[in-house]
């Protein structure tokens, strides 16, 4: 039985780096059960989720983020939403997408919502012939403005993100003596890749491994799929469509329609009468 997916953070006080390790095996299994995506399309979906979910590590308590790719060539839509509590939902549209694009052309948007903040923080970036790894680098440098790098395992549903802390946050070593991001990344990869690529490491194994590498535990957050859809939200969505297209344009000659959440595939039966009632309130 798979352990619950978890994002676990560590810090190397001596070198001034943090590492957040994401064991995404149970999340990817759940997505395979929820979404009817096959072949190369699911491989791409899997890589995108494992690449961008570690961005949860940049959230403060109570914050949420959304990451969206609108690709024109090839045409697809990828959405990922997550909270600091570890709840996430995601989709790849259309579900018939059966390609693993090496180059993405379009744009991506990062949205962050903070408690008490009236307007979300948004970043919109153009994507011109970028791979999924290059998109992640663009987000880290342009949106988060950090020196970070993400590793994605080819053989297990696991990944990690390494960040080089600013020199002013590190007081145990001279700035010139600190390894660069690439040096530290390559050094970490040499000791960690075989460990995680097996896909057999338990949470206790992970803690023990990083302890041996003189890294201190920072945080550990369980990650699970949880959709915030509801019948009321779906009703409001249908009512919004009726406002723009008219009730006959949506219901035609029917008294009710069946709607489906694209994230979790839950079906909701919405009646014409309750939409009319909603529009008068």
Image: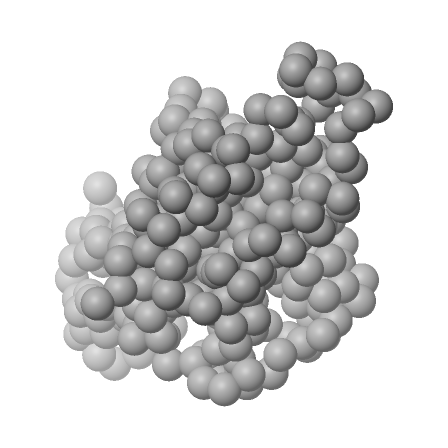
178 or 234: nearer the viewer: 178
Query: In the rendered picture of this protein, how many numbered marks are placed on residues?
Result: 0
Q: Quadrant of the C terminus?
A: top left
The answer to which quarter of the image holds residue 192 is: bottom right
Name the colouring of the figure. one colour
133 or 201: nearer the viewer: 201
Residue in view at x 69 percent, y 56 percent: 135
Q: Quadrant of the N terminus?
A: bottom left
- Find the residue positioned furthest to the right: 176
User: In the image, residue 88 lies at what x, y percent?
Assistant: 37, 51
Residue in view at x 48 percent, y 60 percent: 196
Q: Specify whether residue 141 is in view.
A: no
- Find the residue positioned furthest to the front: 212
Compared with residue 213, is residue 40 higher up or lower down, i.e. above or below?
A: below
Residue in view at x 30 percent, y 68 percent: 30
The answer to which quarter of the image holds residue 44 is: bottom right
User: In the image, residue 36 lies at what x, y percent?
Assistant: 37, 81
On screen, residue 241 versus residue 272, left or right, reads right
On screen, residue 25 versus residue 58, left or right, reads left
User: In the image, residue 244 lies at what x, y percent?
Assistant: 44, 59
Compared with residue 102, is residue 230 higher up or lower down, i.e. above or below?
A: above
187 or 278: nearer the viewer: 187
Compared with residue 167, is residue 264 higher up or lower down, i.e. above or below?
A: below
Q: Specify whether residue 213 is in view.
A: yes
56 or 204: nearer the viewer: 204
User: In the image, residue 67 lies at what x, y percent?
Assistant: 54, 50
């Amino acid at each position: 039985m798979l352990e619950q997916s978890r994002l676990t953070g560590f810090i190397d006080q001596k070198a001034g780096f943090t590492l957040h390790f994401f064991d995404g095996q149970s999340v990817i299994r759940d997505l395979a059960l929820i979404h009817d995506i096959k072949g190369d399309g699911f491989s791409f979906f899997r890589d995108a989720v494992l690449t961008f979910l570690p961005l949860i590590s940049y959230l403060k308590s109570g914050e949420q983020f959304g990451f969206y790719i609108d690709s024109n060539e090839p045409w697809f839509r990828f959405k990922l939403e997550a909270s600091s509590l570890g709840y996430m939902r995601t989709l790849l549209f259309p579900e018939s997408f059966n390609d693993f694009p090496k180059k993405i052309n379009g744009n991506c948007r990062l949205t962050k919502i903070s408690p008490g903040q009236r307007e979300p923080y948004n970043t919109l970036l153009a994507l011109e012939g970028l791979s999924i790894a290059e998109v992640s680098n663009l987000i880290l440098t342009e949106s988060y403005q950090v020196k970070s790098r993400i590793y994605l395992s080819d053989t297990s549903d696991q990944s990690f993100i390494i960040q080089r802390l600013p020199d002013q946050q590190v007081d145990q070593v001279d700035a010139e003596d600190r390894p660069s991001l690439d040096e530290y990344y390559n050094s970490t990869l040499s000791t960690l890749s075989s460990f995680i690529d097996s896909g057999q490491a338990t949470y206790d194994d992970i803690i023990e491994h990083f302890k041996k590498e003189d890294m201190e535990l920072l945080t550990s957050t369980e990650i699970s799929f949880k959709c915030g859809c509801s019948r009321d939200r779906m009703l409001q969505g249908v009512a919004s469509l009726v406002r723009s297209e008219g009730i006959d344009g949506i219901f035609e000659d029917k008294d009710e329609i069946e709607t489906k959440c694209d994230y979790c595939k839950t079906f909701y039966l919405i009646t014409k009468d309750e939409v009319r009632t909603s529009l008068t309130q």
